[in-house]
Amino acid sequence: MKETKQQEPNGEVRVRDGSETLYHATIEQLPAGFFRKDAAGRYILVNPCFCRLRGQSGGELLGRTAAEVVSGRPAGAGSGREQQNIEYLTLGADHHEEIMRSGRTIELEECYVTEDGGGQFFHVIKTPVIDGDGKVIGSQGILIDVTDYRRTQTELKRERDLLRALMGHSDDRIYFKDRESRFLRCSADVARFFSVASPDDLIGRSDAEFYDASHAQATRADEERILQTGEPVVGQMEKQKWPDGHVTWALTSKWPLLNAQGETIGTFGISKDITAMKQGEAKMEQMHKQLLDASLRAGMAEIATSVLHNVGNVLNSVNVSSSLIADTVRNSKVTNIAKAVALMQAHEADLGNFLTNDPKGKQLTGYLANLAKHLAGEQEDILRESTSLVGNVVHIKEIVAMQQNYAKSSGVVEWVNLPELVEDAIRMNSGALIRHNVELKREFEAVPPISVEKHKVLQILINVLRNAKYACDDSERNEKKITVRISGRDGRVSISVADNGIGIPPENLTRIFNHGFTTRKEGHGFGVHSGANAAREMGGSLSAVSEGTGHGATFTLELPVQRQTTS
């Protein structure tokens, strides 16, 4: 080997053979920091990378101990980097003494403040230097830059935390399966859905252990088709049958699960529970049948029409809630999870670099956070509409029961408490009044019970209140008001319904009582006409007054306290 000469820090000239020269050249080119100390703790070898980290030249370090280097710093040197350098030098001196005493290797992590204020992490390994006789004659260390690794680990942890939060708190059932349709991972809601203690209890199990055999076979067939064709199933309505006979409903989407090589290794999917919506639809259909049955029992076509009209507004609310839930489910951004998963799968081999350096990867963390927030908003919307849906179904049930009660009394004259009858009419219109922000005021005088066919009075009042609500809507006023008054004198009682709506032109004040006359696009033109006829049949009258367009209107039903009978 060729020999070279090099002057040591103490001035001595040392002869090196070629292998040692190669060794030192390698150390000089290392992208990691390297140092060596003699038994006294003096630096005898440092490479350029180590000097950069310490912020000092080789000449300032070689031949000096850590304590001497520290003492050589100017008094009051107070930058963050300088203080940190002093701390690491002091710690290094302690490590050197420990290595000289015990001969053990020390591993730790150090973080250096960079010039831009950031942090640079190094994995530090300090080992003893041993001579040919096995004696510890010094220490040496290498500082390996692990900044990118640390950042990648941090990003991966954050991604895992975001996914864990989504899987742990979403009310959507999110799951991943292998090629045999066995669960690999699933969200907390899947565990709740299958009544197991935790998602881990589902790993390795399949739908066949929970669903009715026919439904389990159907889901497996869907997943087999995805595995074979690679085509996803999106927005599929599923009727889920259980062994005990009960049924649930879900809106389900499924996709192929790919590995880094693009091979299909399973499936994953998202299911949203829409059982409440389907039950609401079934109850609504049942209510329709009950309404029709009640009308048929009453034996009058106008009763059937009126019954349906009375609940029409509430049914509209039910329909709106059902549509909003369906639209929310149909347009849900849960499908975007598939895109995010696919993106990460596509870069599985270099996920850390992708998340750290790729423009799309850098945006993925924020995107998932926004997606989790958006899904939480979707969940709140569906819960709110489901609550409204249930409330409206209960309201319809109450109206049906009330209408059935009045239908049974068709043609029967009886003594009726008038305020209670008026409250029933208000109750049947309450949903529409609340939804359209119409304020209703009561001004009831004390009146005696009256002898009437209460179902006819109820139909008149329901129709008048409904027309008052439409008049308020058409006025486009910010404040919509209806006042219901009850008064009585001279053996007669009056119920008036006054609104601040669009009003009635003078030329229409008499025409509104004609059969078929209406100014509403969806109107049928027989409500007021039939009401006036019914009032006359009971010995009373239905009248209207208005100061004209824009000044509201008042409809008044007047009835005798005791109906006169003919012999």
Image (tube, grey):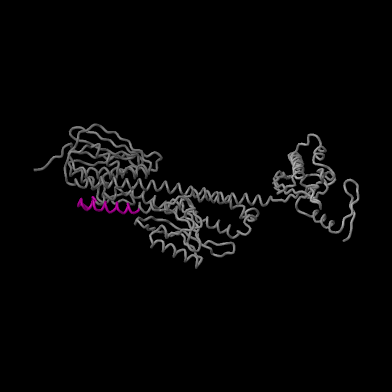
In the picture, the quarter occupied by the N terminus is bottom right
| Along the viewing direction, whichever of 515 and 495 lies nearer the viewer | 495
| Along the viewing direction, whichever of 440 and 103 lies nearer the viewer | 103
| Along the viewing direction, whichever of 56 and 473 lies nearer the viewer | 56
Q: Is residue 284 magenta?
A: yes
Left or right position of 361 against 238 = right
- Magenta residues span 281-303
In the picture, the quarter occupied by the C terminus is top left
Furthest-left residue in this view: 567
Q: Is residue 18 magenta?
A: no
| Along the viewing direction, whichever of 399 and 316 lies nearer the viewer | 399
x, y (%) of residue 106?
A: 72, 47
- Locate residue 72: give its quadrant: top right
Q: Main secondary structure of the magenta part?
A: helix
- State whether residue 51 appears in this view: no
- Locate residue 422: give its quadrant: top left
x, y (%) of residue 311?
A: 30, 48
Left or right position of 126 against 327 = right
x, y (%) of residue 15?
A: 89, 54
Left or right position of 553 against 222 = left
- State whether residue 392 appears in this view: yes
- Locate residue 541: give its quadrant: top left
**Total tally of numbered discs in the picture:** 0
